[in-house]
Amino acid sequence: MKTLTALFKNNIREYGMLIALIAVMLFFQGTTNGILFKPVNITNLVLQNSYIITMALGMLLIIVSGWIDLSVGSVVAVVGALAGVLMVRYDFNWVLTVAICLLVGAAIGAFQGYWVAYLKIPAFIVTLAGMLIFRGLTFILLQGESVGPFPRGFQNISSGFIPDFFNYPGFHLTTIVIGVLLSAVLIVLDMRARKNQQKYGFEVTSFYIFVAKNILITAAVMSLCYLMASYKGLPNVLILLFVMITFYAFVTSSSVIGRRIYAMGGNEKAAKLSGVNTARLLFYTFVNMGVLAATAGLIVAARLNSSTPNAGDGMELDVIAACFIGGASASGGIGKVIGAVVGAFLVGVLNNGMSIMGVGIDWQKVVKGLVLLAAVFFDVYNKNKSS
Amino acid sequence: MSDVILEMRNITKTFPGVKALDNVTFSVKQGEIHALVGENGAGKSTLMKVLSGVYPHGTYSGDIYFEGRECRFQDIHHSEEVGLVIIHQELALVPYLSIAENMFLGNERAQNGVIDWNDTISKTKELLDRVGLHESPDALITNMGVGKQQLVEIAKALAKKVKLLILDEPTASLNDSDSEKLLGLLLQFKENGISSILISHKLSEVNKVADSITILRDGATIETLDCRKDKITEDRIIRGMVGRDLTHRFPPRDSKIGDVIFEVRNWNVYHPIHEDRKVSNNVNINVRKGEVVGISGLMGAGRTELAMSIFGRSYGTRISGTAYKHGQETDISTIDKAISSGIAYATEDRKVYGLVLIQEIKENITLANLEEVSDGGIVINEPKEMTVTSEYRDKLNIKSSSIRQLALNLSGGNQQKVVLSKWLFANPDILILDEPTRGIDVGAKYEIYTIINRLASEGKGIIFISSELPEILGICDRIYVMRDGKIVGEMPASEASQEIVMKRIMTEQEVMG
């Protein structure tokens, strides 16, 4: 039976991050006189960070592959601009617009991926060029001005909430039901995984830790749902995020493709000689990034209810920072989806908390920079200690 | 005591959970070549790291005396100051700098921070002369072979006024003539009063140049043999290293050879950069079911290039020729297709081409055949993966704390077993093994030979590339000799001897030379 200390030691990175996130949240809860955990603010926090998290999912794969994508902020802008132009100037249906924009995102990813994977141009340079190209195209598309507003359906991607089937006044009961179902599913899945491990005779954590872990997770899920329910319910974008995070967490930890991406980032030559088509894999990693950046672009446009030339400016830095804070290695091969998500939330909570406190944007940047540095130092320090 | 240059007394060094060195005592006399031998993991490298200050004073117990003075090195510069220079197996040269720039890196000929290039160049020339390397000081390291790079490293040591030179596996990646040259250099240094410590797995060269041999086993000094008094045989050294008599260095085997399982005909490959240079020239080779076929030749003869070009064109350009499996033409134009045609290639450079070092043993083993441990070829079935990889760990005796240990933390022999496991798990019919025993110790070599025998007896065809002739002769059924990209000889092992093969390898060069 694994002990609690061993469990902690083996996952010091993940738990450390989570504890840091909770500590920061509690800190701001205190300094903002309880505003941070107010339902409306929690909802805001999710909306504000949804696009960063969306892109962090794709960026993590790029960074694990050993590369970087600097263009995502500009891709957010150009896709948002395209959506605005299509819907406002050409009266396209919003669903069709979303489909076109996602395809364009894939094409942008394919364009950059082709240069990196097949023509062997370093991604830093290709995406730096992309950053300029797509920002420029944004200005061309929008002719320098903002375009809006958008149809209600489109806005709902970001600012809508799931419908309530119970109509209980002042309380979103459907959200609670979803929370209960989700908790149940998580517990069942964990139990099955544990049983499976036991069946194969592997070491598992002790029963008490197992129970405690599930109680904690259930408590977290339920209190989040409770907070949301007492406002307007679960935002659409949170559901979207949950689906995407689950999907990418699964792909990276349990799929053949995920394993190959880690192998490619860890040692491209060895992966290639083991039959992994590294060029194609890298190409699709960029296509994936393009689609996710386009998704983020749509979320941003829907949230602002207009396409602006400067949308997504500097966003790539927050996304990359989220991945590194979350434990990804700059040399590739190492990094987890959950880490990147927690990293993105940490950055988001810092932004949000400091804004509420009235800390200026100048000092916010200083603090974020220091957090990034500290997190990566923590990684390197741990690595040196263990070797 | 004046004739003892170095004395290490009662050195004990512990890592969390392991005693790497246990009360080791080691002394080197002035002007001798002292060989340090032992299996991988015996503690040779750790001892040298203690000596050179990589592990600073205070992290170990025991005393070090150099030229009679007690030394407490804090880092490697500290030890270099007194004249103790270590040359690691992985060379520490900057590839895109010139010889001269590398020569005085960290030790620049400069005044007030401005480099005196004339002095640098002329000193470099002088040093290159001393090691017998005829290259311009402006030549870039990246354009030189490993043998020459090794000489640059040694010249660099001379620049630091070396008194005791420590060489860690200096000939591991050198061909025979370069090795010969390097050993000659050590003998010449000895004349000039420079002592050396030579760490090597190649017992024949240890025997050739060493004045004394110290054997380490499991972190302890076993014995120091004096070669000047009486002739020490290789078997004698091996006995000390493994603590038992290795009466047979090669496991016996019954060859049951069947039909030709794989064949390439008229195989031509051109160099990827120098496109008019042929690295494989009309090669025809085959391997039979249950047969171990050796490819012998000097480094640079084109053996690895041939193997890699066959394995999914992973090397070279303008590849032409046909491959046949069981007499049928087979498509091996990509690595993917080669693997599905049942071919596996275990590389000579396991760290660069063989392993994902930052991943676990289990992830390395399944990498080439993830379909086998996944449901529907999409989702990895982790319990199944754990189970099958654990089987390989047991079967190949991979020594590790768990199947989830990182490949990074394994010894060379165990890393090689992980590479082998990977390819065995891909279940090939033809296995190309490129220098599978390079840089691993005698005990692990024997295990690898045993595995090869077992594979052959299971009916696989094995192509075995090695620079060590005794090994080729010891385990192969048939031997090809390669030179300059051509197959210049083929003979059954029963008719071959070291002399015959060597003659084939060298003949044309003798005629031309």
Image (cartoon, rainbow, N blue to C red):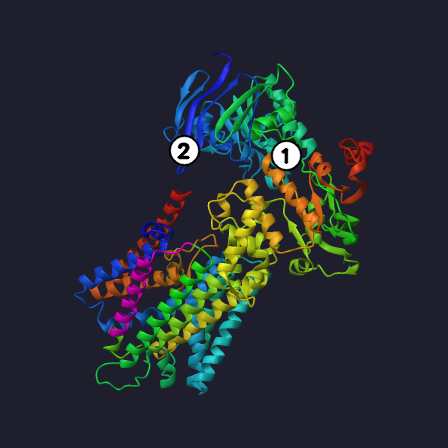
Q: Classify B418 as above or below A284.
A: above
The amino acid at mark 1 is Lys
Give above or below for B103 relative to B289: above
Of A207 and B309, nearer the camera is A207
Residues A209 and B354: in front is: A209
SS assignment at label 2: strand
In this view, which residue lies farthest toward the left?
A33
Q: Residue furthest right?
A: B511
**Three-letter amino acid code at the position of disc 2:** Thr
Q: Which residue is mark 1?
A: B148
Q: Main secondary structure of the magenta part?
A: helix
Q: Quadrant of the C terminus of chain A?
A: top left
Sort mark 1 into few (<14), some (14-19) or many (20+) by Cα contacts within 10 Å.
Answer: many
The residue drawn where x is 38% and y is 67% is A53
Give the left or right position of residue A251, taking residue B449 as reference: left
Mark 2 or mark 1, which has the lower sequence index? 2
Left or right: residue B60 compared with residue B429: left
Name the residue at 78% across, 31% down.
B499
- Disc 1 on helix, strand or loop? helix
Residue A205 belongs to magenta span? yes
Circles 2 and 1: CB distance less than 8 Å? no
Report in which chain the residue with disc 1 lies. Answer: B
| Whole-percent x, y for residue B402 in the image | 47, 48
What is the span of residues highlighted in magenta in the rendered image? A203-226
Q: Nearer the viewer, mark 2 or mark 1?
A: 2
The reply to whether residue A308 is in sight is no
The residue at the point 48 percent across, 27 percent down is B220
Q: Is B135 placed above or below B69 here? A: below
Residue B14: mark in rendering: 2
- The residue furthest top is B2
Front residue of B362/B283: it is B362
